[in-house]
Image (cartoon, rainbow, N blue to C red):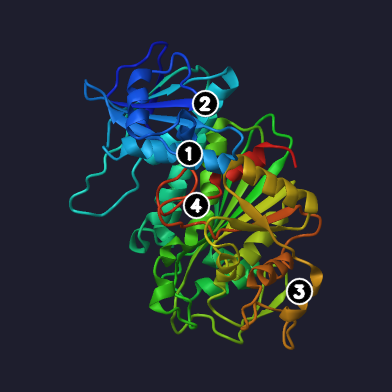
Amino acid sequence: MLAQLNVSPTLPAASHLLVLAPKSKKIPDGLPHAEQLKAVLARRDMKVAELAKSPVAASLPDGTLIVWVMLDFEKDTFALQVQVRKALQLLLEEHPKQIAIVVTGEESECRRSAELALYVAWTNGAPLPVHKKKDDSKPLKQIVLHGFTGSFDAIRAQAEGNLLCRTLTVTPPNELTPAIYRRHIAKLAVEHGWKCEEYDMKALRKMGAGAFVAVAQGSEVEDAAIVHLSYRHSKAKKTVALVGKGICFDTGGHNLKPSRYMHNMHEDMNGSAVALGILLGATQQKLPVNIDCYLAIAQNHISAKAYKQNDIVVALNGTTIEVIHTDAEGRMVLADTLTLASREKPDLMIDFATLTGSMVEAVGNRYSGVLGNSDALLARAVSVGRETGERLCAFPMDEDYEAELESKFADIKQCTLEGGADHILAMRFLNRFVEKNTPWLHVDLSAVRCEEGLGAVGTDVTGFGVSWGLKMVSGEW
């Protein structure tokens, strides 16, 4: 639950106060509690302009904790988000029920400051679920904004989507099996008016979705499914398909992961959580675009029924696949899901997946990688990443890479054993299962987890992709 927002025409009286101003060489006229700020700067031998690098805090005589920060709007969105988060964190560490935010400057500067501060406050003011006997975290109940009036519904929806994504992602695997996940999604569909259709294992076998079934058959309880959610708007002129990898736990299968790499593999369903977060945000914003959301929900277990190296399976579109490594299960479940989604001929298809370790090696966990079948789409994706603070690095997917996936026994190998540019090979593999003339982007979520937070988000699990996806589906492409 996000904090309630009140807009105050007068300077609010609050125990926790954040003051934001545009970068300046002197203290702006009318800045709240300017005399106290002068005293703090003098004590610390700081110049006013240094507030654009580091916020300062002080306790007022009445006990109010106040933080001042200046924003340098020449910096990119990511840098501004980090700056606001560090400032706000000084207040949130006390777990207040209420925070007052004061923005100053020109109208455009006040709007930008307010949007940044509200998104950071909403995102970090709602704690993620924990399972401790004693939990000291307390949600932020109320935000009072002074200095700008306007609608912030889109910012709130963006924060709601990010929170849903992170909440699902941190849920332990025994509390988010495919069956439980599907029930939760069905409940969300009822709450938000989404049409919900499920393709369970029986239906997928009948359809011939052999790539998905190969992975899911290893679970003792066959509760895997592809779930299709639909959001419709009466004024929509375009349809977007979102596809999310939803592996609720990944053991690696017969190619069992060592414990170091199996840790946190309940987060392998993050791609589906990102897609759900975007769908929720779009619904709450009432975006005039139709969205079809396909979630590939399964687990990658080891058992007598589990798929194994050198198996050959037939995918939904008839392509035969030689299995090379059972820990490359993500591309298997996505293969049939992408076919299902692209057969509906969307105007744009985007898939999200924690897919390859090689992407983490390539960019670390502060960026995610993006590949696509259109240079214009890739350019748009990278640009939107800069606008939203969820930064993307584009990679090639040239046809000659696919030579490494040639098989003597099937139409294509699932992967190679050599590693290397596996994030590119994965894209070449998935390309075989996308219907022709489908504009398509693939986001490899290497930034799913970043210790101590990333951009606007202060938790290790970042919800990366929700803000980017909302901006992407709402704009032109």
Nearer the observer: mark 3 or 4; the answer is 3
Local secondary structure at mark 3: helix
Please state which of residues 143 and 299 is positioned toward the viewer in this rendering: 143
Q: Percent from the top left, x then y, of residue 177?
A: 40, 62
Residue at position x 39%, y 40% from top? 124
Lower position in the chain sequence, tag 1 or tag 4: 1
Please state which amino acid type lies under the numbered disc 1.
Answer: Lys
Q: Mark 1 points at which residue?
A: 53
Nearer the observer: mark 2 or 3; the answer is 2
Left or right of 418 on screen, residue 113: left
CB atoms of marks 3 and 1 within 8 Å: no
Q: Percent from the top left, x then y, of residue 161?
A: 49, 41
Residue at position x 48%, y 39% from top? 53
Local secondary structure at mark 1: loop
* Category of crowding for the residue at label 3, using alpha-carbon neighbours closer than 10 angstroms: few (below 14), some (14–19), many (at least 20): some
Lower position in the chain sequence, tag 2 or tag 1: 2
Q: Percent from the top left, x then y, of residue 282?
A: 57, 37
Q: Name the residue under label 3.
A: 401
- Spatial CA span between label 3 and label 1: 44 Å
- Spatial CA span between label 1 and label 4: 34 Å
Nearer the observer: mark 2 or 4; the answer is 2
Please state which of residues 276 and 82 is positioned toward the viewer in this rendering: 82
Nearer the observer: mark 1 or 4; the answer is 1
CB atoms of marks 2 and 4 within 8 Å: no
| In the depicted structure, whether residue 161 falls above or below residue 421 | above
| In the depicted structure, whether residue 332 falls above or below residue 191 | below
Mark sitting on residue 273: 4
Quadrant (top left, top right, bottom left, bottom right) of the N terminus: top left
Quadrant (top left, top right, bottom left, bottom right) of the C terminus: top right
Please state which amino acid type lies under the numbered disc 3.
Answer: Tyr
Please state which amino acid type lies under the numbered disc 4.
Answer: Ala
Lower position in the chain sequence, tag 3 or tag 4: 4
